[in-house]
Each structure stands twice: as C-alpha cells, then as structure tokens.
Amino acid sequence: MRTPFPEHGTEWSVLAARMAAFGEEDVDWRDGRAAVYVFHAGQDVLDVAKRSYAAYQSENGLGPAAFPSLARMEADVVGMGLSLLQAPEGACGNLTSGGSESIFMAVQACREAARAAGRDTQGGQIVVPRSAHPAFDKAARYLDLEVVRVPVASDYRADVAAMRAAISERTLMLVGSAPCFPYGVIDPIAELGELAEESGTWLHVDACVGGYFAPFARRNGVETGPFDFAVPGVATMSADLHKYGYTAKGASTILHRSEEQRSHQIFQFADWPAGGMTTPTAAGTRPGGAIASAWAVMNYLGVEGYCDKARQVVDARRRLAAAIEAHPELAVIANPQLGLLAFTARDPEKLSIFAVWARLKALGWFTGVVTEPPGIHLMLSPAHAAVIDDYIEDLTRAVAEVLEESDSAEGFEARYS
C-alpha cells in the first residue's frame, strides 16, 4: 500500500520514537554483531564523525565559491590520501560518494583519455580478475564498455599471465585490487604495473577496502607487497574513507597520477541560461557533511590512531583465523592480509557452510558470504576485537548443531545487498 503524504506535521519526539521502533529489527552493529556494511572504530570516533557531519550538513560541495571551507577540507583530505598512497608530485583527486562512484570516475576518465588520444572506444574492454568488484561492471554498463573477467590464480590473487593473454586491441583498462573484497588478498600490483606499462594500458587499483588500512598495517609490520602509486604503472586508485577511514557514509576518494589524467574526469557545460557548470564527479550536489566528517576523523586519529586501529583489526583477524584453522571442519580461504576473512568447510559434503551461516545469523551475527568456494565472509572492525571469542564460541556451537542435525542450506541465496 502506498504511503500518503502527511496532512499535518508531527512532533520530533514522536518521530524519534517511531524511527527507533523501525530500527528494532536492524542488526546490532554497535556491539560488534555485524561484520559487513558498518566499520565501527569506537564511540569517540563515531562522535567526531557525527558532530563534524552535523556541523556542515547544510553546506553544498557543489559551490566552492560559496563554501571555501569545503574546498579547503577536500583539498586536505585528498592531499593526505595522496601522501599516504605514495603519489608523485602533480598527483590529484577528489572526494566522491563511495567506492562505486570512485570506480565509475576512473573508468570514465580512462575512456575519455582514450578518445582524446584518437582511439575508437566502441566495445572497449576492462580486463579484471574474477574477484574484482561488480562496480566495474556497473561502470561498464553505463559507459557502454565490456568487462572481461579472468579466473584468479590458485592463491586467489589476480593471474597476471591470464590477464596478459586477455589483453586485445580493445583493452582500455586493467584492474587489480588491494585487497579484493571476496578473499581479502592483495593482487600482485607490481606485476600488473609492469604489464600496464608494457601494453600501454591504464591500470586502476581498487583500494576501496584497503586504501586507508593497508598503509597503516604496513607500518605495523604486515607484509602487503607494493600496491599503490609507488608502482609506476598505476594510473588511478579508489580508496573509501567510509570503510577503514571510519568516516561518515558517503565518502571515498578517486586519485589520479596527474592533473592531465583527471582532466578527462571533469564535466563542463556552458550552453545554459544559468551560466556554466563544472563538476569534478558524477554528483552535482555533494553533501558538505561527508567532506567535513572525512576531514575531522582523519585529523582526529592521525597516523598513530590509524595504526592502532589497524593493529586491533589485524590481531582480531589473526585470532579468528587461528581458531578456524584449528577446527577440524573449517578452513580459511586464501591468505588474508588485512581485515577481511573468508572461511569454508573442509568437506562440503559433510558440512553445509551456509547452514552454519544461518545458525550464526539466528544467534545475532550478521556477516556476508562467498560462493567460490562456498564460505562465510567477515569484514572486521576494531569493535570486533572485544567479541571475537564470543563469535568463535557461537561458531563452534553452530557447526556442531549443523552436523548433528544434518542441516542443509536449501533455498539459500547468496547476496551482497
């Protein structure tokens, strides 16, 4: 039934109570029961993100002349991201609404650069590992391009030789992830960079998950391998602030090696009665709150704070991985390096891992899944450090119950939405 527009206004106290009631069935992410969609770094960080967002919630990033404060904060945030990801002098970027928009802008800039160089982009292709995010397929659909997905290697990372074999005269872009979403492993970006230079192809590194995590984990001694602009062949990177940057939702960065590259991202239009319009991203209006929140949280935490958060997450992931590997029925998929972890059943004929997921969900744990191989997927945050032992206990219980009752996952459908 369609909701009618209310004839009269309602007091805020009534609305607040109604909204609280709406949320009664939502996952309890504040207590660490969710390992997807929300990145909880602690109440203090959440307070900074909310207060800074509220302070600028009415300002509009579309109008830098009216709101130079937002232009200043965006420049600061982009500058910090470029420094963190070892970009060269002359590199640049913008804030976007999220990873999908950052990826879209990278693909769009790549296509327009190819057109400017005189290439026919009709049927242009993006060669990606099977593990790459569907945002590339979304961008390709909007931009009339084609995605060529290449099987990953035995370690679940991009197979560079297979990607080389997939390159054709129609190839515009290569993609690597740092890390990929399904398995939490960083693709061999250095080798992909060499391939990009050798083939004259634009290389985009999707660091939406790891861009504001991997550099701090690396400072803590985690082996990541090269994954950023220190690799000469990397043209663009996407990195989400609202993931492991712990800022308010609606904040990501698209970063370019040069201003010349970014010029192909910019939209300009002058033939309009209200005057010319220039926008750096797909959005027109850009929420000032998201920009302010990113600036405030990054300055609140600093390198020291982010390193501490990264340490908490990696330690939690290692504890969980050790418990999974010690379980006779379970095994970790691949060799996760940061905060993502996926695990599967050692014998899928004996244990339905999706039935285990359903049991855990009934116990209040909301996580994701993977399908190749079937497994349970978690994106860990600092908040999970306090509940890992509880999760392990419930996981052990869920496995035992599924085995005892011979549960199957009939009717289960894996979805990331």
Image: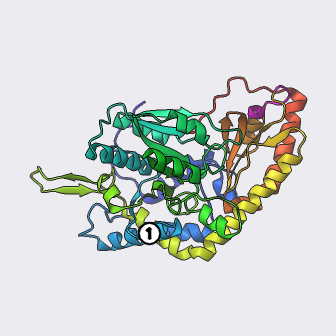
**Helix or strand or loop: what does disc 1 sit on?**
helix
Please name whichever residue, 262 or 402, is drawn nearer the observer in this view of the structure: 262
Badge 1 amino acid: Val
Give the vertical position of 143 relative to 223 (above or below).
above
Quarter of the image with the C terminus in it? top right
Relative side of 270 to 40, left or right:
left
Q: In the rendering, at what x and y percent does residue 16 appear? A: 49, 56
Residue 330 position by quadrant: top right
Instruction: Please say whether residue 260 is one of the residues in the magenta stretch.
Output: no
Residue pictured at 21% horizontal, 53% vertical: 268
Give the vertical position of 385 relative to 349 (above or below).
below
Quarter of the image with the N terminus in it? top left
According to the picture, the residue beneath numbered tag 1 turns out to be: 77
Please name whichever residue, 375 or 16, is drawn nearer the observer in this view of the structure: 375
Please name whichever residue, 13 or 336, is drawn nearer the observer in this view of the structure: 336
Please name whichever residue, 316 or 136, is drawn nearer the observer in this view of the structure: 136
Q: Residues within 10 Å of mark 1 (few under 14, many from 20)?
A: many
Give the vertical position of 184 relative to 257 (above or below).
above
Range shown magenta = 349-355
Q: Is residue 234 visible?
A: yes
Relative side of 210 to 16, left or right:
right
